[in-house]
Amino acid sequence: MSKKALMLRPVDTVATVVEDIEKGDSVCYLLDGKNESVTALEDIPAYHKIALKDMAEGEHVIKYGQIIGAMTSDAKAGNWISHKNIMSLPRNYEDEL
């Protein structure tokens, strides 16, 4: 079954699913105005993140064009990205202004 996800920036490595996803669902999103899809490798609750590409432990996770953390383990495209496999990274917000 085809389901939808939201991706805002072409550099994003994850998308937010907008409905509950079951393993095997095709999850569709727009990338530079073109329809793309990834197959869910596991069940993912609505409004959680799905990996759009394979990611290695330590790799930055990018959502909405921003680094939101780093992977604590390897993930394949289609995996659920959650608190179980991502960690926060310290940021110096003053340098970002």
Image (cartoon, helix red, strand yellow):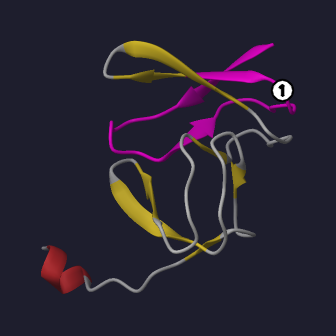
Magenta residues span 1-28
Residue drawn at the location 52% of the way across and 31% of the way down = 6
Q: Residue at x 80, y 42 (%)?
A: 44
Is residue 4 on the magenta stretch? yes
Q: Is residue 79 above or below residue 61?
A: above
Question: At which x and y percent is residue 70?
Answer: 51, 71
Tell whether 89 sits left or right of 52: left
Residue 81's quadrant in the figure? Answer: bottom right
Q: Where 10 sits versus 12, above or below? A: above
Q: Considering only vertical position in the picture, is 32 above or below 72?
A: above
**Left or right: 22 with respect to 8?**
right
Residue 24 part of the magenta-drawn span: yes
Out of 17 and 72, give the one closest to the viewer: 72
Q: Which residue is mark 1?
A: 24
- Residue 74 or residue 88, whichever sits in front: 74
* Residue occupying image coordinates x 86% and y 40%: 43
Pick the residue in front: 17 or 11. Answer: 11
Q: Is residue 34 left or right of residue 72?
A: left
Quadrant where the image shows the C terminus = bottom left
Give residue 83's position: percent from left, percent from top: 70, 69
Is label 1 in a helix, a strand or a loop? loop
Percent x, y of residue 94: 17, 84
Q: Quarter holding the N terminus?
A: top right
